[in-house]
Image: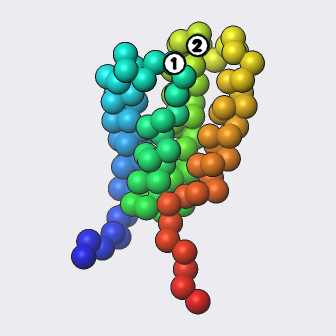
Amino acid sequence: MFTRNPSVVTGYAFAVAAVAVATLLRFALAPVLGEGVPFILDFPTVVLCAWFGGLWPGLLCAALSGLVAWYVFIPPAYSFAVSDPTAPAQLIVYLFASCTGRGEKPKRA
C-alpha cells in the first residue's frame, strides 16, 4: 500500500501545484460548468492536499483556492468586488466546509 510521508516543503508545494492544476482544469471546463459553481473542483483538491500533506497544506489549499475562485470565477471576473450578494456567503460556506472536512482519517482509539 502507498505510504505517504512527504516532507513539509513537499506538502506545501503539492498544495500550491494542486490549486494551479484545479484552476486550469476549471478554466477548461468553464463553458460546460458556467458561473454557478466556482468552487466545484476546489473541494476535492482540498481533500487531496489534506490527505497528502496534512492539516496545514490542506488549509493552505483551501485559502488559496478560495482566493483564486473569488478573483477569477465569481463575477465580476478578475476582481474582488462583490456584484452578487450571495458571493460572500458562498465563500464562507466553502471555507467552513474545507476547514471542517480536511480529508484526514479519524484516529483510532
Q: Amino acid at mark 2?
A: Pro
Is residue 57 in view?
A: no
Q: Relative to the observer, which residue lies in front, 97 or 55?
A: 97
Q: Secondary structure at mark 1?
A: loop
In the displayed structure, 63 sits above or below 71; it is below
Crowd rating for badge 2 (residues with CA inside 10 Å; few <14, some 14–19, many 20+): some
For the residues labelled 1 and 2, the Cα–Cα distance comes to: 8 Å
Crowd rating for badge 1 (residues with CA inside 10 Å; few <14, some 14–19, many 20+): few
Q: Quadrant of the C terminus?
A: bottom right
- Residue at the spot 53% in from the left edge and 13% down from the top edge: 78
Image location (x, y in percent) of residue 7: 37, 63
Task: Tell me if 45 is positioned left or right of 36 in this view.
Answer: left
- Residue at the spot 43% in from the left edge and 61% down from the top edge: 51
- Residue at the spot 50% in from the left edge and 44% down from the top edge: 43
In the displayed structure, 75 sits above or below 96; it is above
Q: Nearer the viewer, mark 1 or mark 2?
A: 1
- Residue at the spot 75% in from the left edge and 18% down from the top edge: 85
Q: Are marks 1 and 2 in contact (CB under 8 Å)?
A: yes
According to the image, label 2 marks what residue?
A: 75
According to the image, label 1 marks what residue?
A: 35
Image location (x, y in percent) of residue 92: 70, 37
